[in-house]
Image (cartoon, rainbow, N blue to C red):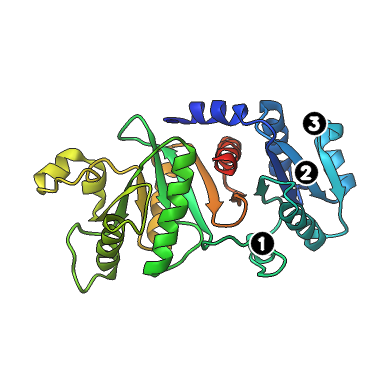
Amino acid sequence: MIRNFKELLAAAKERKGVTAGVPCPEDESTILSVIEAKREGLADFILCGDGAAISERLQRHGGRPADFDIHDCPDSEAAVARVVELGRQGKLHLVLKGFLPTAALMKPILDKEKGLRGTNLLSDILVVENPASDELLGLSDGGLNILPDLAQKKQIVENAVAVFHGLGYAEPRVGIMAAIETVKESMPATLDARALTEMNERGEIGGCRVYGPLALDIAVSPEAARHKGIAHEVAGRVQIMIVPNIEAGNLLGKAFTYYLKRTVAHVVMGARLPVLIPSRNESGTDKLHSLALGAISACG
């Protein structure tokens, strides 16, 4: 079981033969990330975009163009199309967004005929070193799905559980988050939490233990759970938090970065391949850990 990012990087380096496709890696941040990831042995890279600009930036930052498979494309649309095509051909294990809007990448990926759609909806999983225990903590979905309904939340759980299986958590403890730990008809998030708990009990959501609703204190503190009289094995020991909406996930995720100063990693699951869509504000360290998480998720 991978408990921290040091172990995550080490495990990713052991996964040989991982290839990442990168459309439009023509900005400094993406180039620096792929150079470092290549040096660390996390993956090989197929870089699709302006071939001359890519080669120039690689050389400027100490990279060797010969170490990368560079596909010259006339524009960003062609670069994304090439990456998606390579993914459909089985020549890629994950996709890393370069210097282009997220929508410009996700729309072709989601194309029903020519894209990389999987069986589930796409959802973002954030992973951070758990401040409360010696293990990793997952958070979903603070990046893609604005106000998921019950069926979508089930798929969000499944995507997050798949990531944690890849990390070596055989049966991760999943907390369905809400403002309170009791079910109230006036609070739809609590109704969904109860329904997801019952789905898990019936075996409709497998490979994990699900419980909710859980307020944040009850999710992370065994003492708080005992004080409230909640004896479930997930209470106080959550390994994956499923938030009720994108606002909750976005705020909590950024609190790890900006208040706790924690390194985070992100991966989008649900397509045929893991997809990495780093923001411009993410640090180089975060991007490196996201590549490692993507490599693990691709092979998990």
Residue drawn where x is 55% and y is 25% of the image: 10
Q: Residues within 10 Å of mark 2 (few under 14, many from 20)?
A: many
Q: Earlier in the sequence, mark 2 or mark 3?
A: 2
11 with respect to 101 (left or right)? left
Residue drawn where x is 62% and y is 51% of the image: 273
| Position of 192 relative to 67 (above/below) | below
Q: How crowded is mark 3: few (under 14 residues within 10 Å), some or many (20 or more)?
A: many
Residue drawn where x is 32% and y is 56% of the image: 203
Which residue is the site of mark 1? 109
x and y percentages locating residue 37 in the rendered image? 67, 33
x and y percentages locating residue 118 in the rendered image? 58, 60
Residue 15 in view of the camera: yes
Q: Are marks 1 and 2 in contact (CB under 8 Å)?
A: no
168 with respect to 244 (left or right)? right
Which residue is the site of mark 2? 46
Residue drawn where x is 58% and y is 47% of the image: 281
Which residue is the site of mark 3? 63
x and y percentages locating residue 138 in the rendered image? 41, 45
Kind of residue at badge 1: Ile
Badge 2 marks a residue whose secondary structure is strand
78 with respect to 234 (left or right)? right
Badge 3 marks a residue whose secondary structure is loop
Mark 2 or mark 3, whichever is nearer to me:
2
x and y percentages locating residue 150 in the rendered image? 36, 68
Measure how far apart labels 2 and 3 are at the Cα level: 14 Å
Kind of residue at badge 3: Gly
